[in-house]
Image (cartoon, coloured by chain):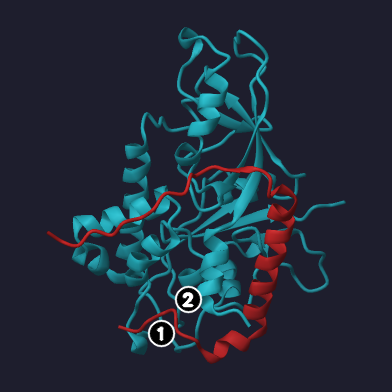
Chain colours: A cyan, B red
Amino acid sequence: MADDKDVLRDVWFGRIPTCFTLNPDEVTEREAEPYYLLLPRVSYLPLVTDKVKKHFLKVMRTEDVEEMWFEHEGTPLKWHYPIGVLFDFHASNSVLPWSITVHFKNFPDVDLLHCPSNSVVEAHFMSSIKEADALKHKSQVVNDMQKKDHKQLWMGLQNDKFDQFWAMNRKLMEYPTEEGGFRYIPFRIYQTTSDRPFIQKLFRPVSTEGNPHTLFDLLKEMCPDALTKDGEEKRFQVVIHGIEPLLETPLQWLSEHLSHPDNFLHICIIPTPTD
Amino acid sequence: QSMSLSVSPAQTAAWRRQICEQLSERSRREMDDFKHYEQAIEQSVWVKKGAM
């Protein structure tokens, strides 16, 4: 039986085969070939698309190039969500490779945040880690870290260095044994049926009676409609990192092992495919 | 403070076994046929520097 470190490795090294094609409305000097890449599930689009940009710029004139952005089947992809979350939410039941269209004009300001450099991604990533630690440890762990420790987390993610990242991230995953878990579980639930970007509320890993909360307990509290009732066909899949954990899985364990590097557990509720 | 990566009896639980199996299945589904694709991030050597 694989141990828990293998789970962390499997989560970290998840890759999504992706085919990037240039938006046909872009002005080019010659035809642009598609570009194929394996994208790390736990990273962010701006961190892993330098090669894509370089590839398409070869066929474009500088004056026709504005900020690059990505779209899947008409939906602009939010760079500030982890890549795996974007795939699970928008495309998990579609055929691989994942098809992404690359744009260099008409940036959709209403849907997307601008990302002029990777330092914007770094600021977003570190602020998520700080928010998660505020929920887990009242910010104690992240505040006790030095600037170089914060950099180690960021560089680990940016350079896809599992050991470098986890050497520091393990501190963010500790908790007092007697409490049975973090103060609150940092989670975000994304639903295709809601106009809200996601659900994020306070939820403890252990009940007031001292029993460990499960994924079922969280969903029952946050989005009961996502659960299948007795005698009813399953309408929704509850997807984390491309898999569907059993609903009896303890939430604290999920938080420690299936959180993204930003320390949030990202949960996608998507309709069950009908085919 | 406890270490969260230690081995626990819960490892034999059905939910845990199912997660490991599904992660393996995910690798097969998402990666096996695409090993010839280029990796998005180039691997470089990480050198840990001590505090000055």
Q: Which x, y percent locates residue A150?
A: 27, 56
Tell me which residue sits at (66%, 43%) in the image.
Answer: B37
Tag 1–tag 2 contact (CB < 8 Å): yes
N-terminal-most mark, 1 or 2: 1
Tell me which residue sits at (35%, 76%) in the image.
Answer: A174
Amino acid type at mark 2: Gln
Q: Quadrant of the N terminus of chain A?
A: bottom right
Q: Residues within 10 Å of mark 2 (few under 14, many from 20)?
A: many
Chain bearing mark 2: A
Q: Nearer the viewer, residue A94 or A112?
A: A94
Amino acid type at mark 1: Gly
Tell me which residue sits at (65%, 19%) in the image.
Answer: A32
The residue under label 2 is: A252
Secondary structure of the residue carrying numbered label 2: helix
Q: Which x, y percent locates residue A244?
A: 67, 65
Q: Disc number at residue A180?
A: 1
Residue A193 to residue A255: above or below: above
The answer to whether residue A246 shows anywhere in this view is no
Q: Disc number at residue A205?
A: none
Secondary structure of the residue carrying numbered label 1: loop
Q: Which x, y percent locates residue B2?
A: 35, 84
Q: Quadrant of residue B19?
A: bottom right
